[in-house]
Image (cartoon, coloured by chain):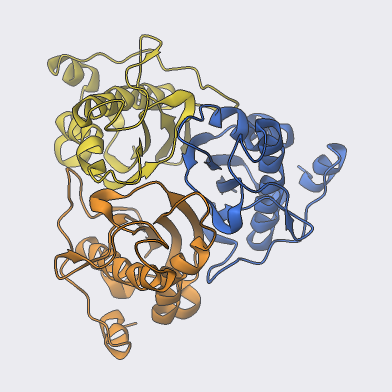
Chain colours: A blue, B yellow, C orange
Amino acid sequence: MDVRARLESLGLTLPPVPKPVAAYVPAVRVGDLVFVSGQLPFHEGKLVATGLVPTAVSVEEAYQACRVAVLNALAAVAMVADLDQVSQVVRVGGFVAAASDFQDHPKVVNGASDLLREIWQQAGQHARAAVGVSSLPLGASVEIELVVRL
Amino acid sequence: MDVRARLESLGLTLPPVPKPVAAYVPAVRVGDLVFVSGQLPFHEGKLVATGLVPTAVSVEEAYQACRVAVLNALAAVAMVADLDQVSQVVRVGGFVAAASDFQDHPKVVNGASDLLREIWQQAGQHARAAVGVSSLPLGASVEIELVVRL
Amino acid sequence: MDVRARLESLGLTLPPVPKPVAAYVPAVRVGDLVFVSGQLPFHEGKLVATGLVPTAVSVEEAYQACRVAVLNALAAVAMVADLDQVSQVVRVGGFVAAASDFQDHPKVVNGASDLLREIWQQAGQHARAAVGVSSLPLGASVEIELVVRL
């Protein structure tokens, strides 16, 4: 499967992989698994969503931010493996910066899940944990972590 | 090992697996590992515990809710693998909706750990991370994520 | 590689592994992977940092606490595998107890990442997710989870 062509047909392009904001690497391959670092919604060097959901950004904006974070995650995969050889998305960890009365984390993290399914269909379906956190690096509204199998 | 019989001897039955509240699947198998999506404490279609621990629900209620979430996690495992072939519970991720002064996350998530040990004894002992989060999907008090080995 | 000698050259020693504060085990080995339970910054039986970052403890104190937690994580690895046979640190999960306006989680969790790189250099570079949580077990300021490959 040609993932870049598939992204293009979705009107998307793979970004340059964001430089880790700290002392780690974007992705590590162990055997046929790739563990991707938690990705923030960076687009052209800027976070597209900062602050708590839904007060600072809406559920829809946070959904879109998850799509952006997934693109960064795929760029990270591509650093250590051929993106076209991904055979299964295994796990998505979705962290949403949210207050204690927020309940719509699934709607937000669907931004990640929907895009992965748009790209890989059946093979894009994954296990997922979505939780609300008190804050995220650099004030980001969402962070997406990924494990894929080649 | 007959897990369903073991559950029955504990007075428990495997529930129907809750429909994911979003665009993902309850569990994914990769080789001999099964990654289970974060499970909420659904019982007969309703969350048994909502709101922050310990203000909205007690530590004991949240402990019981973790047992309920584990049953859902096992039902998810059973969708992709024979539950009787689980050879080791590998990892439990325990998320507790809690305020900043809460300290008893371990007592809460023990609801998950104790049940897994009741079912599988030695093979039910697992690595675990328990943390306090600001909020969880649908207002749930706890969420349990699981990795098991076949 | 002699990890204990390397630690000694860094002025560090492997602590006795902290007893899990609950019904689980410090680490589980599956194949060539070791999953380590979330470790708190225990030093000689006491937490070196409690409360929210940066109000109760500074970023620098929390950074140091992450180093302490990593030592405990390595002691946990050593319970189930030969520490000298670690070939790659795969993933670090870094949880920082923090309020909603905190942004410097990466600087805090670098305490874990830096130490792992000091010990294993290239093989110590890992995928990482750093998030801010509302609270942690026993009031700890940080919790570090680890996956390593042998």
Q: Is residue A14 above or below residue A124?
A: below
Q: Position of residue C68 (x, y in %)?
A: 29, 70
Which image quadrant: the N terminus of chain A? top right
What is the quadrant of residue A105 in the picture? Answer: top right
Q: Give the camera-side residue of C94 and B72.
A: C94
Asked if residue C32 lies left or right of residue B19, the reply is left
Q: Is residue A58 visible?
A: yes
Q: Give the camera-side residue of C34 and C25.
A: C25
Q: Furthest residue to the front?
A: C55
Asked if residue B84 lies left or right of residue C22, the reply is right
Residue at x-position 18% and y-position 52%: C20
Q: Furthest residue to the bottom?
A: C9
Q: Is residue A36 visible?
A: no
Q: Give the camera-side residue of A139 and C146.
A: A139
Q: Position of residue B21 (x, y in %)?
A: 53, 22
Residue at x-position 42% and y-position 58%: C94
Asked if residue C51 lies left or right of residue B32, the reply is left
Residue at x-position 50% and y-position 77%: C122
Q: Position of residue A96 (x, y in %)?
A: 55, 41
Asked if residue A41 lies left or right of residue B120, the reply is right
